[in-house]
Amino acid sequence: AVMRLRSWAWAAAGFVGTRGQPLEECAVVTVVTTDDFTECTATMLHSARAAGTTVRMVAMVTAAVGDASRQLLGSVGANVVEVPTVANPNNIIVFPSFTDNYTILRIWQLNEIPGLPQFSKAVYLDGDMLVLQSLDPLCALPELSAAQDLGADRSWTTAAPEFNAGLMVFKPSGDTFDFMMQNAGAVPSTSGGVQPLLRAVFTDWTRLDHLRDNVNAHAYEHQRSSWDVSRMRSIHFTGPLKPCFTHPRQYHDAPDDHPYKLWHRAHHRRQQVEYAWPAPREIHGRIPTALAAGKFEDWFVGLGADDILRLGFGFGESRYKEMPCAHVVKHASAALRVFAKDVMQIAGRSMEHCLEGSCAEASEALWEARTARLG
């Protein structure tokens, strides 16, 4: 029944079987489910090629991804193919970006996509990554190879025993896809993300060096002594603040090995723009950066934890404790106040830059679109 369902899904998307196609050793694969993430993903793919990756690159996109985004992904050398969305089986989805997160499972169907060869192995990367060295050597590793999840408990001191699914070496297999689809609803995810299912299926996995592959960008701050860009193959920008949502001015004074500064350099190289860090300028009588921090104190000082829960989640502490929200607690408890303050300061700086006319036309259109959605 699962095989018939899978065949129907591909047929509905206009796909047919591809058995008998030429065999290629390996591919780099990523999945895009929203236009908002295309800039990040395009820069990741371009950085992979610029770092010496020679294998084919494939970007799986869903129907929600528009033509302009598909053209951008194709312009950096990816084969862009549309795949059906995989429904999220969880009742609670903490982050909107996790709504279509289970579509990542489609990577195991890589060998069933028309027009592509058969691959004996593939390397999956999240779009919010930066590649600094060739990914080709990873193709020689077994399924499943991945790096330990640095900072899963937000201690930032040791790597967790589980892997982070942002980078995975895998073997395309329709049987593996079928198995995961059959068991997706049986493996709960408190965040609504697909990672718990992947960890449950691949319990025997090969450990990559988490300070070389899939290096968590937060290690720059929390494990500074271990941060060595010269030996890193890839950096992963976990958390809600993705580099394609930031402005290079924010990192003008940052050291050259700062992860976000590295990303913006790669982004400019992708756009074939001569890179020069724009110096920040004072804007008298407009929006001083200190104002953002001050407003934060005015708005939030005096609020209790229960008040914040009601404001942010719509219900109070007693109801909150009844729900399986361990993942929410992990992200939203002690770090919430510091994170929110940082976001307000970044927003203040971004507004300054736009007011002084440094916003690109595309950025202004994006801001308008997002503001309209919020309204």
Image: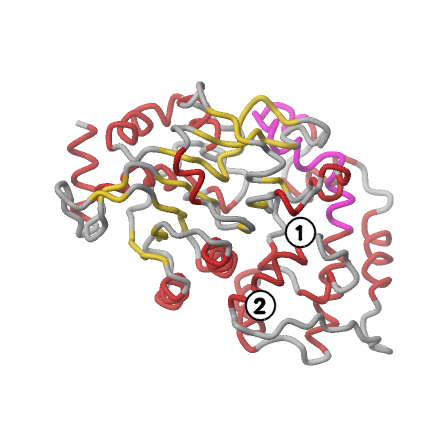
SS state under label 1: helix
- Residue at position x 61%, y 57% in the image: 263
- Residue at position x 77%, y 73% in the image: 279
Residue 329 found in image quarter = top right
The residue carrying mark 2 is: 268
- Residue at position x 41%, y 51% in the image: 33
Can you say which quadrant of the picture contains the C terminus? bottom right
In the rendered image, residue 191, in percent from the top left (x then y), is placed at 53, 33
Does the segment drawn in magenta span residue 328? yes
Towards the viewer: 136 or 222? 136
The colour scheme is secondary structure
Specify the amino acid type for callout 2.
His
Specify the amino acid type for callout 1.
Pro
In the rendered image, residue 115, in percent from the top left (x then y), is placed at 20, 53
- Residue at position x 61%, y 27% in the image: 326
In the rendered image, residue 335, in percent from the top left (x then y), is placed at 74, 38
Q: CA distance from mark 1 to mark 2?
A: 14 Å
Pointer 2: residues within 10 angstroms few (<14), some, or many (20+)? Answer: some
Can you say which quadrant of the picture contains the N terminus? top left
The reply to whether discs 1 and 2 touch (Cβ–Cβ < 8 Å) is: no
Q: Main secondary structure of the magenta part?
A: helix
Nearer the N terminus, badge 1 or badge 2?
Answer: 1
SS state under label 2: helix
In the rendered image, residue 195, in percent from the top left (x then y), is placed at 48, 31
Towards the viewer: 141 or 300? 141
Q: Find the residue positioned furthest to the top.
A: 204
The residue carrying mark 1 is: 259
Q: Is residue 104 shown left or right of residue 164?
A: left
- Which stretch appears magenta? 318-341
- Please tell me whether residue 58 is drawn above or below residue 109 in the rendered image: below
Does the segment drawn in magenta span residue 270? no
